[in-house]
Amino acid sequence: MEALSANEAKTQFGDLLLKAQRAPVQINKNGKPVAVIISMDEYESNEALKLQLLQSRAIRAKKDIESGNTIDGESFFEALESGQHD
């Protein structure tokens, strides 16, 4: 991924927009990554994928509840905090 400083992004904004149409561009401030610029198509694709994932998880959760396949809240949050998921 190409990276630009915040100052470069500011002074080369038109070029930045063109580059973002081809691939994500990282913006750094004081040498640290602070943002990524992506095309609108890529953004919309990411949002659609997130929605599909959320919908599939909701369907799965509904089926689990209907079949009695549940766990207690404490176990759920412990697994969530530890990064475990399926």
Image: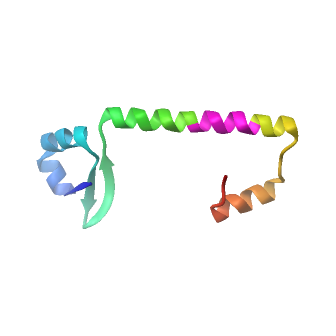
User: Where does the magenta region start and end?
Assistant: 53-61
Find the residue positioned furthest to the right.
68
- Residue lying furthest bottom: 31
Place of residue 5 in the rendered image (x, y in percent of width and height, measured from the top left): 20, 58
Q: Position of residue 55 (x, y in %)?
A: 62, 33
* Residue at x 86%, y 38% (from the top left corner): 67
Whether 85 is drawn above or below 61: the answer is below
Q: Nearer the viewer, residue 53 or 10?
A: 53
Quadrant in the rendering for residue 28: bottom left
Q: Residue at x 75, y 55 (%)?
A: 76
Q: Is residue 60 covered in magenta?
A: yes
* Above or below 50: residue 85: below
The image quarter in which residue 15 lies: top left
Count of numbered marks:
0
List x then y, in percent, for residue 22. Answer: 23, 40
The quadrant in which the N terminus is found is: bottom left
Question: Which residue: 19% across, 43% down?
Answer: 19
Q: Quick check: 48 left or right of 73? A: left
Seen from the viewer's position, the closer of residues 83 and 5 is 83
What secondary structure do most residues of the magenta stretch adopt?
Answer: helix
Instruction: Based on the picture, tell me whether residue 36 belongs to the magenta stretch.
Output: no
The spot of residue 59 in percent (x, y) is 70, 33
From the viewer's perspective, is 75 left or right of 33?
Answer: right
Q: Residue at x 16, y 49 (%)?
A: 10
